[in-house]
Image (tube, grey):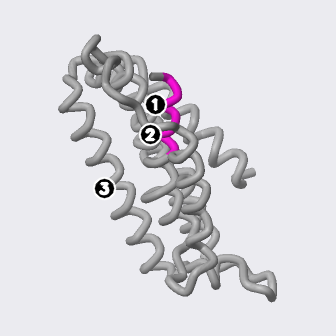
């Protein structure tokens, strides 16, 4: 049976199998500047993928789960949400954020810090964009706003 849970588990398995050999050694070699560039590049690629999906499938928030119950192009949606390559990219974003915190110097630790509650509130407020007239879908809001802001929140909490 090839359904959403199996798609998710196969993508997660692929990501976990590639982490120790392909991703972690490469991320461990990067400087803080390199980590920031990689995080921005991964966010940009995620945005391109999700915008491409949204425009190809004409998936926008008002049509994602219409009132009549029809779900448009669920196969394309599953490829977007559960594809092993995209799951690997999103997991790599988390690893990059964790590594960035690990490389903090004493000077970085002395810098004034923003209260993380504002990042938390901004991340969850970004989900409200699905309700606006701009008609952003879940994939775009999560990939472009929620994940980067929530990642900043988590790194601020660790610092």
Region in magenta: 150-158
Query: Residue 129: x, y in percent?
Result: 56, 71
N-terminal label among 3 and 2: 3
How many angstroms separate mark 3 from mark 2 (CA)?
16 Å
Residue 122, compared with residue 134, is above or below; it is above
Query: Residue 51: x, y in percent?
Result: 40, 70
Q: Secondary structure at mark 1?
A: helix
Q: Quadrant of residue 53?
A: bottom left
Is-magenta flag for residue 148? no
Q: Which residue is mark 2?
A: 152
* Residue lying farthest to the right in this orientation: 68
How many angstroms separate mark 3 from mark 1 (CA)?
20 Å
Determine whether label 2 and label 1 are within 8 Å by CB: yes
**Residue at point 55%, 53% (across, down):** 123
Query: Residue 103: x, y in percent?
Result: 30, 17
Determine whether label 3 and label 1 are within 8 Å by CB: no
How many angstroms separate mark 2 from mark 1 (CA)?
5 Å
Query: Residue 39: x, y in percent?
Result: 31, 41
Q: Which residue is mark 1?
A: 155
**Residue at point 55%, 80% (across, down):** 60
Q: Which residue is mark 3?
A: 44
**Residue at point 32%, 55% (across, down):** 45
The majority secondary structure of the magenta stretch comes to: helix
Badge 1: residue crowd in 10 Å (few <14, some 14–19, many ≥20): some
* Residue lying farthest to the front in this orientation: 112
């Amino acid at each position: 049976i090839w359904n959403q849970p199996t798609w998710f588990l196969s993508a997660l398995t692929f990501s976990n199998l590639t982490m120790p050999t392909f991703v972690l050694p490469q991320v461990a070699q990067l400087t803080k500047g390199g980590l920031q560039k990689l995080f921005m590049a991964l966010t940009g690629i995620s945005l391109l993928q999700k915008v491409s999906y949204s425009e190809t499938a004409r998936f926008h928030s008002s049509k994602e789960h219409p009132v009549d119950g029809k779900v448009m192009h669920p196969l394309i949606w599953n490829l977007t949400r559960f594809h092993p390559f995209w799951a690997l990219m999103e997991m790599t974003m988390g690893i990059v954020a964790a590594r960035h915190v690990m490389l903090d110097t004493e000077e970085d630790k002395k810098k004034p810090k923003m209260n993380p509650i504002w990042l938390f509130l901004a991340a969850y407020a970004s989900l409200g964009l699905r309700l606006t007239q701009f008609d952003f879908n879940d994939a775009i809001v999560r990939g472009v706003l929620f994940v980067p802001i929530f990642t900043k929140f988590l790194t601020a909490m660790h610092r």
